[in-house]
Amino acid sequence: MDFSLQQDTPEMSAFRQEVRAWLEENMKGGEHLRWSGNWSTRENDEEYRFRRALAGKLGQKRWLFPTYPVKYGGAGLTLDHQFVLETEIDRYGLSLGSVFYTLARLVAPAVMKFGTEEQKLEFLPPMLRGELAVWQVLTEPQGGSDVANCQTKAIRDGDHYVVNGQKVLVGHHLPPDYLWTFVCTNPAGKRHENLGWLYIPANLPGVTLQHMHLMMGIKNAVFFDNVRVPAKYLVGGENNGWKVANSYLELEHGGGGSVAEQPLFKRLIDHCQKADFDGESLIEDQDIRDEIADMLIDLDVQRLMGLRNFWHRYVREPHAYGGPQFLYFQRMVRLRNSERVQKILGYDALVPDNSVHEVADFEYTVRSGPGWLHGGGTLDTDRLIIARRLGLGRPAQEAAPTTVGE
Amino acid sequence: MDLKLNDDQNMMKKVAADFIKVEAPSYRITDWYQKKQAFIPALYKKTAEVGWLGMMVPEELGGGGTFLMDCAVVFEELGRAPLPGPYFASGVLAAQLMLDGASPEMKKTWLPKICDGSAVIIPAISDDPMQFGPRSVQTRAFKSGEGYKFIGAKRFVQDGSAASHFILAARDDAGQVVLGLIDRNAPGVTVTEASGFMIGAAEVKLESVEVGKYAVLNGSNGAWAVVESALGKVLPILCAYKVGACQEIFEMTNEYTRTRVVFGQPIGRFQRVQDHCVDISIHLDGARWTTYETLWKLDSGIEARASVHQAKAVASEAYYQSCNFSHMVFAGAGTDYKHPLMAHSVLAHSLYQYLGTPLYHKRAMVDALYPRKLKRAG
């Protein structure tokens, strides 16, 4: 076995140099910015604009989706190249997937797999060039985990679908360009056979956004009031939406893996080394050290699960339950860490510090522990998916199939 | 990056699995555990012939000269059974203590015997039922001629009854730890099997036991440095044994949810039951990957002190908790000593504090990363 990440071939080493030099040049002007997490809760417009501009530049270089075919706006490079790009941008505390405040990272593979050639040629290039902010618009007021119980209707009317309904808990503080929307295309149809995906331009008449103020920051409600969406925006065919959802949600459910580092832990250690109580440094306190031990183990196991998933994706050998297991574990670790941080810092853990990267901010950590227990499904749906993948309670050959994302 | 086993390792894994299928089928394992037979000499001999004792000992000293990862692959399969016996204690740990602390003459004499199974050498470090570390060594070593006289009692020596010899830790007049090799049948040595909810432990009493100067393994930086150095390499092998055990528990528990029908349906349809399997998966994979990464670091010459402690803490807890979650699924049936889970449950409890509890190793992990300013002994 070999866990080392940095064994570049001469070709990759040259590419890494190129990427590093490019980033040095193009990250200029962002030195004073303190990044938000993957999902902004800071509502920092300057940071948002910098990241969108950076995404545009990366997209122009075709480095945002490096492995995609050239004709769709990718660079036709290998996963090795993507890995180099991911690790280099990680040095700045950013990630390729979230640099531009969009869920294009999830949407593009679905279009790639289920779109027609015309759709791919039309939808993908601007998305892959980083020009667009795309939101995933899935959750509805009456149901999050039960996504198949979709009440937003899209009824065919000539060359259009007429969309009516409401989605909630999506997006950021600034508006999107497209809405990747789960809809019911046949209200009279059977469950799982009556759904579809629409790639809806956000500026169509009848689309209204309304901020929702949440524990994790600003998200939105999206209202569709007789929105006429040209039929060409239906991806994957009418009533075939469940199949599309099942395939690409694996990515959201942790199948993509992660190789990111944990700046929160470093900052906590730093705090414990500097802070003292009655003359003794916090880091010398055995109770504090025991909290640190548990946190370190959680984070290391999480890192290793991410690495394992990355590897399975890399060699294209699906891991039966690795995706949802990683996601589940990550949520639990975030929750436990949120409590650990408060145990160590008390009131100080409740005071935001905008001078650091959001993912290392103690207040954000405390808030996002319980706050992010549900993104992309609840803890309990994670467990359910793992159980299905393990084929618990059913003959082994009936275990749910796994999918590998792009 | 490459997270797969290589072809050789896959072959070793298969050989080990096949061996166990023939020599130690489930019904024999449960029988041994129920009767507390922690050492089956005939089986031990056979494993020596396959080359599983002293796998990492250099070939010129009778061993296999393998990497840690290769040895771990075999131990994972042994743990699946779980095969009882001093495979780790003598074949791995005692061998490593010899390699790190013994004189060239001692190595030449004893390592081939460890490897062919004719000597079963059991390390006996801690005197305490729970503690580990140099302070847990309470047996006294009094100067006697050019060697020592050991006096003390080690209440729980894992695999103690299997021993032909012991590597014993004691403290001299200056409070320094010394290590001595003694014959089980030497005058003053009494070995009494411990009884209780455990397997393999024995009390070793030492009433003025002579340890000659040629039987001392104090290395060049003191005996505790020898213990630390040896454990720093081979603890992940013990972890691999536990990983294999967790894998077996995971599979048998999942299978039970498919075949056990209650309220008219397989119990795996109940989400509460599914949760227990999910929890086992997390303990299993946490143990597996911390262990693998540590083995890789050691085989690659990368500093791994904290990782070794981490793997030991995670794997011991994983084995213990996997048993508990499995008990939740098997319920009454799983508490029968005739059930395969009971072998694991007894063993997981026995190994929980062996060579340091999870808490001990968590603390040692943090100490390795962020050394304390105020150095406390132990």
Image: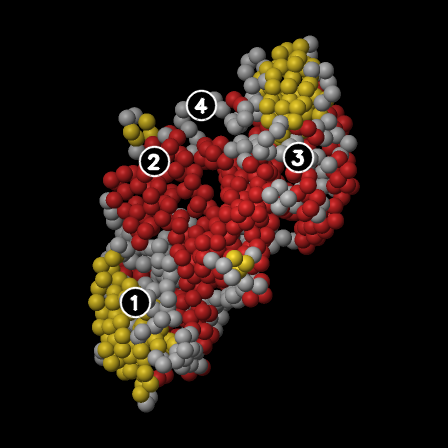
Secondary element under disc 3, as helix, strand or loop, is: loop
Marks 4,2: beta carbons within 8 A: no
Q: CA distance from mark 1 to mark 2?
A: 44 Å
User: Tag on residue A272?
Assistant: 2
Q: CA distance from mark 4 to mark 2?
A: 20 Å
Q: Are marks 1 and 4 on the same chain?
A: no
The residue labelled by disc 3 is: B36
Q: Residue at x 49, y 24 (%)?
A: B378
The residue labelled by disc 1 is: A142
Q: Quadrant of the N terminus of chain B?
A: bottom right
- Badge 3: few (under 14), some or many (20 or more) residues near its Cα, within 10 Å? some
Secondary element under disc 1, as helix, strand or loop, is: loop
Q: Residue type at mark 2?
A: Cys
Q: CA distance from mark 3 to mark 2?
A: 48 Å
Which chain's residue wears label 4?
A: B
Residue A157 position in % (x across, y down): 31, 87
- Badge 4: few (under 14), some or many (20 or more) residues near its Cα, within 10 Å? few
Front of the two marks 3 and 2: 3
Front of the two marks 1 and 2: 1
Q: Residue type at mark 4?
A: Arg
Secondary element under disc 4, as helix, strand or loop, is: loop
Q: Residue type at mark 1?
A: Gln
Residue A179 position in % (x across, y down): 31, 72
Residue B213 position in % (x across, y down): 70, 16
Q: Nearer the viewer, residue A297 or A361?
A: A297
Q: Nearer the viewer, residue A244 or A38?
A: A244
Residue A256 position in % (x across, y down): 46, 61
Which chain's residue wears label 3?
A: B
Marks 1,4: beta carbons within 8 A: no
Q: Residue type at mark 3?
A: Lys
